Amino acid sequence: MVQDRGIFLSILPATRGERRLALTVVAISLGVFLVCLPFAKQPILHIDAFIPAYAATVTINDLITAVLLFGQFTLLGKRGLMFLACGYLFTSLMAVSHMFSFPGLLAPAGLLTGGSQTTVWLYMFWHAGLPTMVLLYALRGDADMPGRGGVAIAAGCAVGAVLAVVLLTTLGHDLMPVLLFVVDGVPYYTLAFRIVVGAVAALSLLALTAVWRRKSHSVLDIWLMATMCIWFFDISLSAMLNERRFDLGFYVGRIYGALAASFILLVLLLETRALFSRLAGSLERRAGELSLANAALQESEGRLKQLNETLEQRVAERSSALEAEIAERNRIHETMRETQKLEAIGQMAGGIAHDFNNLLTVVMGNAGFLEDRLAAGPERQAAGTIVRAAERGARLVRQILAFSRRQAVKPEVIELTGRSTELVDLLRRSTRGDIRIVADFPNDLWPFECDAAELELALMNLCVNARDAMPSGGLVRVHACNCPNGVAPDASGAGSRVGGLVPNPDGPPLGDFVRISVTDTGTGIAPEVLAKAFEPFFTTKEIGKGTGLGLSQVYGFAQQAGGAAEIESAVGIGTTVSIFLPRSMAAAGAETAESKAATDARTPAGGSVLLVEDDEDVAVAAMTILGMIGYRAQHVPNGGTALALLLGGEHFDLMLSDIVMPGGMDGLELAQRVRRHFPWLPILLSTGYARPAAEVHQAGFEIIAKPYNAASLLDAVMRARRAAAGANTETA
């Protein structure tokens, strides 16, 4: 548990300004509700894409909110946070179930259905789940309980509740009361429907009242009350005051539902932004305050010598010195508190990365399997949409870890001149057809050392920003040059500039660098905006079109590689973003394509894999992906069982093991023991957490980061098999 709990908005008391903001949001929502009220039964255009878009928005927002709340629960141990996390997880899964059951969307009667009442009953259970959890939060949420052990149980209960509701409304369809019936294609609501939906709406108001009656309100409490108000508007318009599906009340009510799914997520994201701001400034403040403390202590020693002259002077100056010492101790104590906050942020970032990457592995693996197996059509398109959404989530986690400098790196010597064609092909996929990308790398460009994947991600982020700055198309130029002693030729010299290498006039030269620049012909950046461009979560894009982490990832990557980042821009002319990377004196030692092909030709495709994974869902997804690339997998939940199978004579062509596992043996220790007994066996380790990666690379094992798809897993498997084949050749 963290010692300074006041840094979390779920604990921090709400200010008057925050209360006014929440009240304003509710007042505006009420005004729109009253305006739409007389027209709720007005039929309007039937939009087929509305339901999947609405369900996807609610599912993604609620799923991310649940992950963030589970993360805070592990740190704070508050039972109320667990209730809310379960509520949002239940709501996200119910939104998916409701979409699959909706008539005419994926099938004439719905893909997941037991009859005409399934969809409406799923809607009722869906909209009763979150108010129930908010009510438990308000009544029993202040108690403490262990965090880490309860997350899996709580999440399992939420998933089990969803499964129970789905089974009840499908297999038990005939046992449920009739809520609506259809006459001549027009649905009509029964008295039972009015009673049930009234009870669900009343439950929302009851949850709102319970939170309002709490003795003190945190920021989270204020926005929970706002969420319950919007939730009530959703139920009223889309189920109580409208007449049928696809009328005005149907659409506006569901828009209210999407807004209700966004409030708590927005609060938690703003909290994360504030925590990162404190992290960025804490080290600088600590250095300054310690310097002031040392100066003050030296000054106090001089004063003590002068106090011996007279008794009166001694008393007066002694009092002054004591006051100064107390002030310095207070400043030192504040510095220690900032350090503790930094560590708490690091733990939270690592925990979110591990849990969220495991979740994305399950989503990406199963959705990729469905996309590979389904015929062309809406189902395959939906599976592809899920895969792309999971990939965007994985990139977001990598960007957060890159800015906080907790992303594991695998540095290698890179000669950029030979990669121009490959790089242009990669970057072209992140832009539009009306944007031309050219690469200009001189033949005498120096090699440099960095993580190739992080370099590609940084350049892709810059190309995406260039694309958004050129709505009518244009030219993106990726160019590089050598910078002896950190001095770079200035191509234009026009416009404002932020960042770059900072020379030390009294110290040694900076050394040699390679500058890689991305130049666009877009709208440019105003000077007042340019000054904040590298700040995390700062963005000028519309809501939903940018995370504000792209340039922050570029800045964090350059700093971690020992270089710097620079932006030069002129309004109306364009922008150039440059990355400075230290020159490497070592030659590039990458394996040639011919040697890889020769090794792969000697390595038989397919085979049996020993899969070691403690998470059952991740294991199922991994087995599915392995099957897609031609491998058979046998799953064991821990390292002890895996080692026993191998020592008992079981034969496998590869071992794929998670690194972070409960119990006495983690994945790295298992890999080291297996290598001692079976040096010929290829070993591949996987993890969704950044910290163990450096230790794994030092031990000489191949590693793949979660989440992964079939292509990346196949590449990692072939790397592991090539490494094992090379080691066996050297031994022989």
Image (cartoon, grey):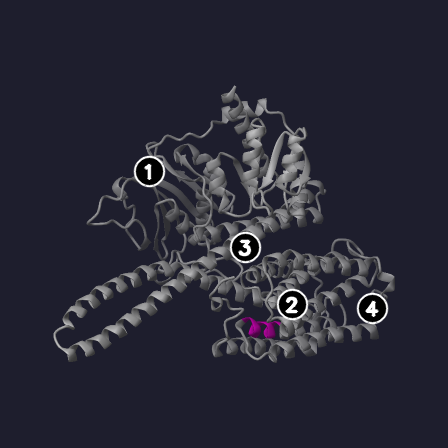
Q: Secondary structure at mark 2?
A: helix
Q: Which residue does the numbered mark 1 point to in the structure image?
A: 583
Marks 2/3: CA distance?
Answer: 26 Å
Q: Within the magenta stretch, is there residue 221?
A: yes
Mark number, residue 352? 3
Amino acid type shown at disc 3: Ile
Q: Which residue does the numbered mark 4 point to in the structure image?
A: 180
Please give the range of residues in magenta. 220-227
First along the sequence among labels 1 and 3: 3
Marks 1/2: CA distance?
Answer: 53 Å
First along the sequence among labels 3 and 4: 4
Mark number, residue 257? 2
Amino acid type shown at disc 4: Leu
Residue 108 appears left or right of 573: right
The answer, for residue 211, to whether it is visible in the render is yes
Q: Nearer the viewer, mark 4 or mark 1?
A: 1
Q: Is label 3 in contact with label 4 (beta carbons under 8 Å)?
A: no
Nearer to me, 519 or 473: 519
Q: Nearer the viewer, mark 1 or mark 3?
A: 3
